[in-house]
Image (cartoon, coloured by chain):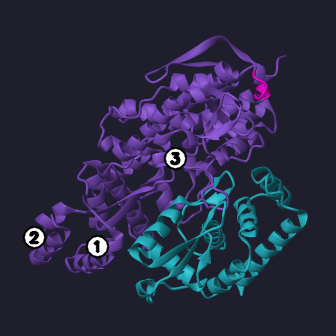
Amino acid sequence: MLQEHAKLVQFISLADGVTGRKKLQKMIYIAKKMDFPFQEKYELHIYGPYSEELTLRIEELCEMGFLAETCEDKGSYVQYSYRVTGEGRDFIGDAVEVPDTLGECITRMSEKSSRFLELVSTLLYFDYLPRKEQIEKVHIVKNKLNYTDAEMDEAFAFIGELSACILQ
Amino acid sequence: MMDYGLQKLSEEKVFKDPVHRYIHVRDQVIWDLIATREFQRLRRIHQLGTTYLVFHGAEHSRFNHSLGVYEIVRRMIDDSFSGRPQWNDSERLVTLCAALLHDLGHGPFSHAFEKVFDLDHELFTQKILLGNTGVNEVLRRVAEDFPQKVADVIGKTYPDKLVVSLISSQIDADRMDYLQRDAYFTGVSYGHFDMERILRVMRPAEDQAVIKQSGMHAVEDYIMSRYQMYWQVYFHPVSRSAEVILVKILQRAKVLSEEGYTFKQEPVHFKSFFDKTYDLADYIALDEYILMTYFETWIREDDEILSDLCDRFVNRRLFQYIDFNPAKEYRKLGELDVLFRKAGIDPEYYLVVDSSSDLPYDFYRPGEEEERLPIHLLMRDGELRELSRESDIVDAISGKRRTDHKLYFPEDMLKEGKKKKVLRQQILSILNT
């Protein structure tokens, strides 16, 4: 019961909070693609993989008081941050078993920008294609973000690092 | 000899349709696609899954809906876009094919089946388009890269975003058909809007179809229809009860198979899904007729849970439900879980929280996680303005998510069970029934 909710609280706890809804969306997607057992269903929206289910669960967790949401006015938009509350820590207790490697992956993702994680998650969305076609797809769906070749290389290297980290 | 992609039928074919009156087919490619076994399979998949158990008229299929989406897109292109400079007529055939085939990958009882076996119907649509199938064979006769083009439109990665938006956006042919079709077949009075008016005021633009300012009220009506249909039909709690049972049947069969249980009716069609070795042929071979045959025969299985769940689904003995607020009542859920186990009722199958949530309309905010392309109005001076900035009605519901949680349980089993009566009474009193 509410196992999937507990996994998300655990994730945000391991990240020591997450700033930005977009960043959280992409982090969970990347973790899922790295075979961590998140069940949220993702679809390709106009600008990248996005999960309605995840949005819903995060809202519920805030309502339950297990996550605290703060918002900061950034002028043209509002940025949301999430951290686990004391009640949230009680809620997860020992209920969720976390693979050792998840914490390491989360740390690596947390250090990256939202824009970079957006690129990584979109590349992973097309990971059934050869590298050249993956890049072409990203340029089509994210034609306004103008990712450079250097960013593409960095993103592939990052995916390699995460995969290696899981195999440790 | 004329290109296959340009070939027209010697006479126009029409399908009589209760929503659009007639569906017109002139293109040989479209006619041939409809005849493929993969497209005909859609006749055996309900458009609304388990909803027919609540609204008895909702027996329509993905086949009807797919033809409807095709017809709306055909009218958009032929009646509204053709000849306008923003529309490239060489995109006509790929757009029509994508409209017709957009739901090709739906499995039996779409969402429940996907949930249990962690599948994605959009991915299977792509596989059917690109794999060794009749549909692929027809599309390849147009051009070697044509199946990939159709797959890109449906996968939202086609370079021409206008083409994608006709099939997938907040005002697309998919929604316009299913709202009207589902309203017609369920018999509800919601879901109706003036599609003729919307099609007349729809104009092609760079990245999407836009609506002339004079058509704003027709779009308001469309958005409100969608809002009402979600809460009156799509999220109907009784239909969700049937879907909960359906999910639990499939989960139980999977668990039994993994435990080495000997089925009287071996789940031959499911084996590859249980052990994740399925291929495209396994997927295409499944439809709702096959699932229902298994469910009917599994009523006579020795496993009490599988037998009971199948009987409930086939004979419409659905779970009862109460409103549930996870924020305030999650501890109650834990308490019930313990009591169910003590009473000998497995909560894994008989105590289920189901949530439904909908966002009727939203617009893209830079930096935000929500990534929906808004509906744009074309003003008289040529400027594009986001709908909610002009419409007070749409503004009132923009970005407002509505969520509903229900807790499902077998009330009859709790009331009629002969063993552990006191415990069962205690459970019923917590459930307040």
| Residue B214 shown left or right of residue A151 in the figure | left
User: What residue is shown with label 2?
Assistant: B418
Q: Where's the N terminus of chain B, which quadrant?
A: top right
On screen, residue B381 versus residue B320, left or right, reads right
- The chain under label 1 reads B
Specify whether B256 is left or right of A120. left
Number of other residues with Cα within 10 Å of mark 2, as a class: few under 14, some 14 to 19, many 20 or more: few
Pinpoint the chain carrying mark 3.
Answer: B
Q: What stretch is highlighted in magenta?
A: B84-90
Local packing at callout 1 (Cα closer than 10 Å; few below 14, some 14-19, many 20+) is some
Q: Label 3 to label 1, Cα distance in Å?
A: 40 Å
Quarter of the C terminus of chain B within the rendering: bottom left
Marker count (numbered): 3
The chain drawn in cyan is A
Q: Mark 3 points at which residue?
A: B361
Residue B233 found in image quarter? top left
Q: Classify B76 as above or below B173.
A: above
Q: In the image, is residue A101 above or below residue B142?
A: below
Q: What secondary structure is found at the residue carrying circle 1?
A: loop
* Amino acid at dot 2: Lys
Residue B204 x, y percent position in the rendering: 70, 30
Q: Work out how far the residue at label 2 is from the one at label 1, CA to CA, in angstroms.
A: 16 Å
State which chain is coloured purple. Answer: B
Residue A38 within the magenta-colored segment of the rendering? no
Q: In this view, does A67 lie to the left or right of B93?
A: left
Residue at image point 50% right, 79% down: A9
The reply to whether callout 2 and callout 3 are in contact (CB within 8 Å) is: no
Kind of residue at disc 3 = Tyr
Query: Against B29, is B427 above or below?
Result: below
Labelled disc at residue B346: 1
**For discs 2 and 3, the disc positioned in front in the rendered view:** 3
